[in-house]
Amino acid sequence: MTVVRIASRPEDEEGILAVVDAAFSDATRDASEELGIVRGTWAAMNADQLIELVADDDGTVVAHVLAAPGRIDSAPTSVAGVAPVCVAPSHQRRGIGTALMQSLVVAATTRAWPLLLLLGDPAYYARFGFEPAGPLGLTYAPAGAGSPHFQARRLDDYDARQRGAFTYCWE
């Protein structure tokens, strides 16, 4: 049975890195960028500053999502960036990624974070309430101005005055 739970480091680190690698590697690319994001977030933030969830199937990590506050216009903020969501190929198309994202939104709302930001497929993330971040006054330089892939999910504590250039904690 697959269960979504809070990650327990260091016990889950090896499993998390394995699922990130499996989810983002194929014959055309390796997962070095995504692995660097996860490791960079771990290095930049204390565990109590982030939300890290895994899906566990009988003791094996099969999916992972991670979010942590970043910076807007170089100033620390409670606006959080989401690391790449990943599900092991053997467990994809079972609703596990959906369960992780729904749990992340609930956890971020509980923390009173105002926004979640991410780079991803608009068609996938729209189902979780994500929308283009540009019209909200938020940009991410590597994505380019107005990129539909840089997306925001407004939460209960959203404040429209939180605008500017976003930087993830791992950068």
Image (tube, rainbow, N blue to C red):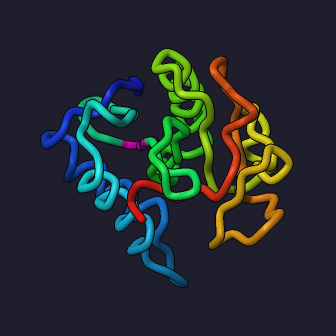
Towards the viewer: 63 or 83:
83
Give the position of the N terminus as an image quadrant.
Answer: top left
**Residue 159 image-quadrant placement:** top right
Span highlighted in magenta in the image: 62-68
Left or right side of 25 for 143:
right
Towards the viewer: 35 or 24:
35
Visible residue check, residue 168: yes
Visible residue check, residue 65: no
**Residue at left 50%, top 81%?**
29
**Residue at left 80%, top 49%?**
132
**Residue 126 image-quadrant placement:** top right
Q: Main secondary structure of the magenta part?
A: strand
From the viewer's perspective, is residue 171 above or below residue 121?
below
Q: Position of residue 91 (x, y in %)?
A: 49, 44
The verdict on residue 138 being magenta is no
From the viewer's perspective, is residue 67 above or below residue 41?
above
Q: Position of residue 75 (x, y in %)?
A: 48, 50
Give the position of the C terminus as an image quadrant.
Answer: bottom left
